[in-house]
Amino acid sequence: MKNKLFTILIGLAMVAAILPAYKVKAEETGHKHCICGAQHTEKGDHVSDTQTEYSTRLYMKDGKLMMGDGEWETRETALTPYVSYDAYSLESGNYYLDTDLEFSYELIEMPVLFIDGDVNLCLNGHSIILASSQSSVIEVIKGKSLTLTDCKGGGNISHKGIYSAGHGITTAGTFNMYGGNITNNFTFGVTNNIADKANNGGGVFIEPNCTMNMYGGTITNNKAVSGKDSSTGEAIEGHGGGVYVSKDSEFNMYGGEISGNKSNLTGGGVYNLGTMTVSGDAKISGNGKNSRNYSNAYMGERGTLTIGGKLTGKIGVSKYDSKVGDVVVTGADADTDYSAIFFSDNFNFDVKHDGNNIVLIPHTHVLGEWKHNGILHWHECEVCSKVLDDAEHTWDEGVITKEPTTDAEGEKTFTCDVCKATKTEAIDKLPVVNDEIQDGSNNSQDTDVSDKNQNNGTTGEQNNDTSAITSPETGDKMNLVLWIALLAVSTSTVIGTAVVKRKTI
């Protein structure tokens, strides 16, 4: 009995020892990290390690949106004092995704995630997707804020489906972006009003008097294009494929990348009517308004671009009503070389560092090697892609690079005196004329004729003496000699027999 009691006590002690360990493990696996991601990185005004406990889990289960331990309930959300929707929204707090979230009309009449407070949201490697709807994926309500990060990477804010259009994120408050990828969103307007946000800001639309701070992440493959004005039929002018900065708004870019976005007019990357500041490793390049013309950071009327600190990125710039000598960037360090950082998107200009400014100067073409096809040669500017010096080839007299034979064609190669391009032409095979080959060689029949002429004591000329003509050979000469020899032997034998008989008689 004592042994059994002792065994039970030992078991209870072991369980008691294990339970605290499980408790500590549960605490350690909580979703906690700096607001900039899994590992703190100083960028811009983000200098301190701001550890945040992302305590509320967002996920989908059986086709339903879930929050924490229960179903995510919609609620009436006021966008303005006069407009409200029954929609999914997040109030002030710290949230993280545990699965992808997909909003659609099948779930709610207004399938938009509204930010109705000061919200920290970690994508945690997952995505928020708006399916078959024409609205923003996320909308920050006036006066509220969203801080977006992704501690694992790979999370997206995007639209899905051929009938799905709208901004990735619209902000009427403050939007801080540390991570994630805003991608595959596009606007589709119905009027040609430049202030109509339905036309502009495929990735992010910043409302007037609002702020966006970008520390990291990417904004890529978004579009502000397409459509015709419903009243005039004219093509709609789309601006800001990546980001649209409204009048009196701020866009501070301390890092991250804006690339691969397009608009059908200006500002494929960024269209700025407000105040834009860049520093750190901010990169705005590879955006365009079609396949050959690039439009990265475009400064609209009264839009400004300022260097806010050390800058190591790559940024293409252009501006409204450009002229030689115009300032496109201010705040430059007089002792810093910005030639590898800024470049002009307007092919009529280059940029030059002038004191504390970056100014426009006339474009100087940079020509590489000659390009050519079978008819023309030309130069192409490596900066603006403009075609120069195009003309037809000037071919030389050519050289034979392969001699012709009776069995194969030859080849002649010509070289352009200007671009050194080459072309080849075939040379016909050598012909055979009257059994005599042009190169002087004889065939087997010619050889036999020559031999017969020599045996007959004649030349190659025709011999009219019929006595010299011999009968054609009809058999083997050796057989004829044998028959003659046998005849001679037989004759000798007969004669010899006759003589012997005579002597005997």
Image (cartoon, rainbow, N blue to C red):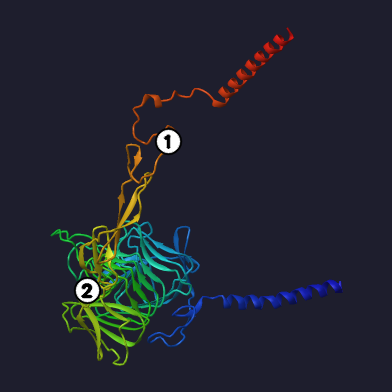
Q: What SS does tag 1 mark? A: helix
Q: Residues within 10 Å of mark 1 (few under 14, many from 20)?
A: few
Q: Amino acid at mark 1?
A: Gln
Q: Is residue 26 left or right of residue 356?
A: right
Q: Is residue 157 above or below residue 16?
A: above
Q: Nearer the viewer, residue 269 or 318?
A: 318
| Disc marking residue 347 | 2
Q: Nearer the viewer, residue 204 or 285?
A: 285
Q: Residues within 10 Å of mark 2 (few under 14, many from 20)?
A: some
- For image coordinates 31% across by 49% down, the residue present is 427
Asked if residue 198 shows in the view, the reply is no
Tell me where residue 500 appears, x and y as whole percent: 71, 12
- For image coordinates 27% across by 85% down, the residue present is 306
Q: Amino acid at mark 2?
A: Phe
Taking the view exactly as shown, the residue that stands out farthest to the left is: 232
Residue 495 sits in quarter? top right
Q: Is residue 387 above or below residue 490?
A: below
Residue 452 sits in quarter? top left
| Disc marking residue 383 | none
Asked if residue 108 shows in the view, the reply is yes
Q: Is residue 351 left or right of residue 410?
A: left
Q: Earlier in the sequence, mark 2 or mark 1?
A: 2
| Label 2 to label 1: alpha-carbon separation | 86 Å
What residue is disc 1 on?
454
- Circle 2/circle 1 CB separation < 8 Å: no
Front label number (2 vs 1):
1
- For image coordinates 19% across by 59% down, the residue present is 228
Tell me where residue 349 appears, x and y as whole percent: 21, 78
Tell me where residue 268 appears, x and y as whole percent: 27, 70
Q: Is residue 443 left or right of residue 21?
A: left
Q: Nearer the viewer, residue 475 or 156?
A: 475
